[in-house]
Structure formats: C-alpha cells, structure tokens
C-alpha cells in the first residue's frame, strides 16, 4: 500500500492550492511556505479594525475579521478561485479550522453559540454543487465551541438581482432578499455569520439586518478573506 501511495503521488501529485508547488508528506492543502507568507489580517485581535468599519452605520455587528487579506491577482485570490470555481472543497474546511483555533483564543469570539453560513440561492447551489460558505463554516465548527445551522437563514432571490440595487434599495428590500424559517432557533444567541470573501459588505449587511430583527441576538462576522484593509 505504501508503494501504491508513492505511485499516486507520482502521477497525481498533491499541490499547494495557493502556489502550485508539490506538497511534502506532512503538508496539507497549503505548503509550509505559503502558510507563513500568505497575508493574514490578524483582525480577530483588533477592535474597530478595517472590516468592522465597513459596517459602521450599515449593520449592527459586534466583531468582524477575516483570515487573509485579499488582493487582485495575488495568491489568496488564486486560493479562493481554486475553492469556489475548481471544486477543491477541502480548502474551505481547512482554512475554517485554522481560523477557528485563532477565534477560540480571542475573547472577542469565544462565546459564539451558532455559526451561520451566508446562503446561496437554490439555483446557484444547483449549478455549483456546494455552498462555499457552508464548507468554511464546517471548518470553523471543527475547532470552535459552536454549532453550524445552515438551513434557517435562506436566500429568497439570486444575488445578481441584489447587486443591481443601490445601497438604499438593498436596505429597503432586505426582507425580499433573505428570510428566516424559525426565528426561535436564534433567539438570545450569539451568532457568527460567515462568508468566503468580504468586499463591499452588502451581502453581510443584508443578512445581519435580518438576523438583528430577532430578539436578543448578537451578530459577529468572519470571512476567509477580505479586501477591506
């Protein structure tokens, strides 16, 4: 069996999802070099960080962070592309588990009760075959003292319709974008809303606006990467 494993690695080498180098035996998903060199935000340690300021005046967010800094044509963009569009699902779970460990060490995220992935519209879910935010959430669940609930917050309309609206139109029509099936599941809970990449923050804003209508909730946000820094 050992020799068979060597043959598999020879013809189907395991590659770093960020840089494309062959992984060593002890490495998984991301090589040791990229593990060290990929730009991390460390915003889980910082109050009023650049991601949190994105939502000031837009959504009631207790704390927000992302694992990586996202830049166009960088390795993080390549990593996210491999995850979302090439079907390497293990990337989301792996990064989620890494970030979850850091969140458990931060007093800003240690009391989370429920992890909620940003939902995909059913048409996009059928096309892609998976929800990247849910896989990221499953990774977080592995290393946090919280559970994932992935079917209570749902998307009513496709995101393409949402992106054509102005910020004011998105705010007015938020109840037409996302919905909650059973608000009692989230009542008086500390919620962690998760997405793959935060850019303008409009999707998170819409989700948080719905969640904050539920009695006693507190919403925090994490993402795999963010362009806000």
Image (spheres, rainbow, N blue to C red):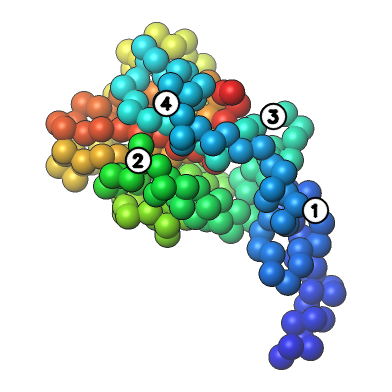
User: Is 115 positioned to the left or the right of 18 in the image?
Assistant: left
> What x and y, as percent, mark residue 109?
36, 41
**If you read the primary sequence from the N terminus, does the residue marked by circle 4 or circle 3 appear first?**
4
Residue at the bottom extreme of this rendering: 1
Q: CA distance from mark 1 to mark 2?
A: 36 Å
Q: Which residue is mark 3?
A: 71
User: Is 121 positioned to the left or the right of 150 in the image?
Assistant: right
**If you read the primary sequence from the N terminus, does the residue marked by circle 3 or circle 1 appear first?**
1
**If you read the primary sequence from the N terminus, does the residue marked by circle 1 or circle 2 appear first?**
1
Comparing 222 with 213, the one in front is 222
Q: CA distance from mark 1 to mark 4?
A: 35 Å
**If you read the primary sequence from the N terminus, does the residue marked by circle 1 or circle 4 appear first?**
1
Q: Are marks 4 and 3 in contact (CB under 8 Å)?
A: no
Secondary structure at numbered mark 3: loop
Q: Which quadrant holds the C terminus?
A: top right
| Residue at screen point 21% across, 26% down | 213
Q: Which residue is mark 1?
A: 20
Q: Which residue is mark 4?
A: 47
Q: CA distance from mark 3 to mark 2?
A: 28 Å
| Residue at screen point 81% across, 62% down | 22
* Residue 42 appears in the rendering: yes
Comparing 41 with 85, the one in front is 41
User: How many C-alpha atoms fall within 10 Å of the one at disc 4: few (<14), some, or many (≥20)?
Assistant: some
Q: Which residue is mark 2?
A: 107
Comparing 84 with 215, the one in front is 215
Secondary structure at numbered mark 4: loop
| Residue at screen point 14% across, 31% down | 215
């Amino acid at each position: 069996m050992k020799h068979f494993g060597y043959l598999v690695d020879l013809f189907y080498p395991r590659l770093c999802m960020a840089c494309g180098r062959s992984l060593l035996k002890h490495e998984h998903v991301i090589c040791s070099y990229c593990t060290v060199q990929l730009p991390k935000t460390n915003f889980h340690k910082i109050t009023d960080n650049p991601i949190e300021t994105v939502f000031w005046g837009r959504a009631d967010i207790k704390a927000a962070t992302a694992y990586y800094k996202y830049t166009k044509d960088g390795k993080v963009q390549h990593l996210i592309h491999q995850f979302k569009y090439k079907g390497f699902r293990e990337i989301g779970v792996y990064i989620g588990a890494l970030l979850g460990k850091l969140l458990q060490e931060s007093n800003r995220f240690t009391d989370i009760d429920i992890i909620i992935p940003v939902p995909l519209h059913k048409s996009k879910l059928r096309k892609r075959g998976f929800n990247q935010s849910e896989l990221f959430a499953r990774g977080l669940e592995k290393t946090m003292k919280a559970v994932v609930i992935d079917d209570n917050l749902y998307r009513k309309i496709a995101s393409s319709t949402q992106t054509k609206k102005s910020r004011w139109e998105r705010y007015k029509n938020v109840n037409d974008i996302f919905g909650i099936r059973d608000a009692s599941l989230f009542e008086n809970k500390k919620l962690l809303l998760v997405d793959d990449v935060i850019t303008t923050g409009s999707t998170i804003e819409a989700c948080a606006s719905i969640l904050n209508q539920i009695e006693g909730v507190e919403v925090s946000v994490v993402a795999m990467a963010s362009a806000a820094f």
